[in-house]
């Protein structure tokens, strides 16, 4: 490591993204992408935007997109002032961690969760405490209560990743009420596949930041668009961080494509419904094969087999041209995380598993 940069950099543990293989014809069920394309309206909008206007900087506030996101949540009192957008929800989350820079008090997040949280903590020098999941792999609201002023904030995905387990809004509300002086970030990357969003709570809880993405339920992972909804003061602080970092995080095609995508509610509902239906079929097949499948409200399932080693199963699937995700950390190293593909892709997976069990 170069001695010329800060020692903080050599101590970083960077996030390792899931594999993006170059080989065609693989059944790719490892990074929770949508098996369906983006809304055709989004593709048209993107195509319209790719031309001479690329000479010009984009709107720094991504105004049309903020307005479209706010319009979708108008019934919950959301206006563009309560909306923040970024280059993927990863960037939105990075700004949230940055806003807690050297806060001096540890933030809390689950010990089994999205592994970018410890990475951002390292980058922005935010102390953290990893809170163990319950025995059934759910997040226990009680563990996030009673810390008073000793903590700097709370963040968790809902549903959690990589477990897929969902927390109900009543539990989230208990966490918000128990931490009125602390920011509570709910990362809803997978909320559209069966969960209930916390966005309606934003009006009542000025400490709530809800983060969502266009990468999963709107099939725009390759475009990198994410957003947050929260009290205007929380959002204004994120804008300060963003404008101290990159005032144009979203390019013109991204603003146009994401705006069209969020306006196409019909396509969104249809494709989310297809993913949920395929998930239920896959859960039934895996259960029949003897897997224990955690209850999933996401576009993936987390499953283990009492008689078969997960690493070996992942390798056997790979041999058959199917990629799933296997994590090596202690408590979850016997699980496979399987993204919900088309029924056909899920069927190919099940047939391959039958061969190897
Ligand atoms: N949060 C969670 C829990 C995720 O799993 C992911 C996807 N890896 C993200 C946020 C980031 O998604 P994106 O940056 O594509 O919006």
Image (cartoon, helix red, strand yellow):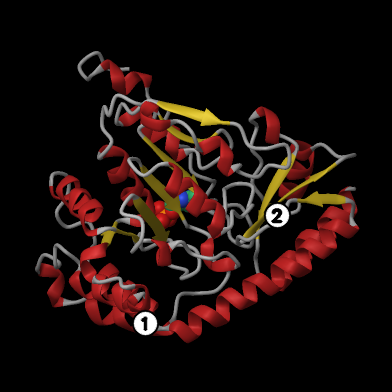
Q: Residue drawn at (87%, 40%), measured in percent from left and top?
A: 306
Q: Residue drawn at (37%, 82%), measured in percent from left and top?
A: 263
| Nearer-the-camera pick, 56 or 185 | 185
Q: Looking at the rendering, which quadrant does residue 260 occupy?
A: bottom left
Q: Which of marks 1 and 2 is nearer the N terminus?
A: 1
- Dot label at residue 216: none
Q: Looking at the rendering, which quadrant does residue 310 occupy?
A: top right
Q: Can residue 27 be seen in this view?
A: no
Q: Which residue lies furthest to the top in this view?
A: 3
User: In the rendered image of this protein, does residue 75 appear above or below residue 98?
Assistant: below
The answer to whether the residue labelled 1 contacts the one labelled 2, judged by CB atoms less than 8 Å apart, is no
User: In the rendered image of this protein, does residue 154 appear above or below residue 150?
Assistant: below
Q: SS at mark 1?
A: helix
Task: Report the label total.
Answer: 2
**Front of the two marks 1 and 2:** 1
Quadrant occupied by the N terminus: top left
In the figure, is residue 173 to the left or right of 357? left
Q: Does the residue labelled 2 lie within 8 Å of ligand 1?
A: no
Residue linked to disc 1: 263
In the figure, is residue 256 to the left or right of 177? left
Q: How crowded is mark 1: few (under 14 residues within 10 Å), some or many (20 or more)?
A: some
Residue 287 drawn at (x, y percent): 85, 57
Residue linked to disc 2: 321
Q: Can residue 245 be seen in this view?
A: yes
Residue 198 drawn at (x, y percent): 46, 61
User: In the rendered image of this protein, does residue 212 appear above or below residue 237?
Assistant: below
| Nearer-the-camera pick, 143 or 25 | 143
Residue 302 drawn at (x, y percent): 70, 50
């Amino acid at each position: 490591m170069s001695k010329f940069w800060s020692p903080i950099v050599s101590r970083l543990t960077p996030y390792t993204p899931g594999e993006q293989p170059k080989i065609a014809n693989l059944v790719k069920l490892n990074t929770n992408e949508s098996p369906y394309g983006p809304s055709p309206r989004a593709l048209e909008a993107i195509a319209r935007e790719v031309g001479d206007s690329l000479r010009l900087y984009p709107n720094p506030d991504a105004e049309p997109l903020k307005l479209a996101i706010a319009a979708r949540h108008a019934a919950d009192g959301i206006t563009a002032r309560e909306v923040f957008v970024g280059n993927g929800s990863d960037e939105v989350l990075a700004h949230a961690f940055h806003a807690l820079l050297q806060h001096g008090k540890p933030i809390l997040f689950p010990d089994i969760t999205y592994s970018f949280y410890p990475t951002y903590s390292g980058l922005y020098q935010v102390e953290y405490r990893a809170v163990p999941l319950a025995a059934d792999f759910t997040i226990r609201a009680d563990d996030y209560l009673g810390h008073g002023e000793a903590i700097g904030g709370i963040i968790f995905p809902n549903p959690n990743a990589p477990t897929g387990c969902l927390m109900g809004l009543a539990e989230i509300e208990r966490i918000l009420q128990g931490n009125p002086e602390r920011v509570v970030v709910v990362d809803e990357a997978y909320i559209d596949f069966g969960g209930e969003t916390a966005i309606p709570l934003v009006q009542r809880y000025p400490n709530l930041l809800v983060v969502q993405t266009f990468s999963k339920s709107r099939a725009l992972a390759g475009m990198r668009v994410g957003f947050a909804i929260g009290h205007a003061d929380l959002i204004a602080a994120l804008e300060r961080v963003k404008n101290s970092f990159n005032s144009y995080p979203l390019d013109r095609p991204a603003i146009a494509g994401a705006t069209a995508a969020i306006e196409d509610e019909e396509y969104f509902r249809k494709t989310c419904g297809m993913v949920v239906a395929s998930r239920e079929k896959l859960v039934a097949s895996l259960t029949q094969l003897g897997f224990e499948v955690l209850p999933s409200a996401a576009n993936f399932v987390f499953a283990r087999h009492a008689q078969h080693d997960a690493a070996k199963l992942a390798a056997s699937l790979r041999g058959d041209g199917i990629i799933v995700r296997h994590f090596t950390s202690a408590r979850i190293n016997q699980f496979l995380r399987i993204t919900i593909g088309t029924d056909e892709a899920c069927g190919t997976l099940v047939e391959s598993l039958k061969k190897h069990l």
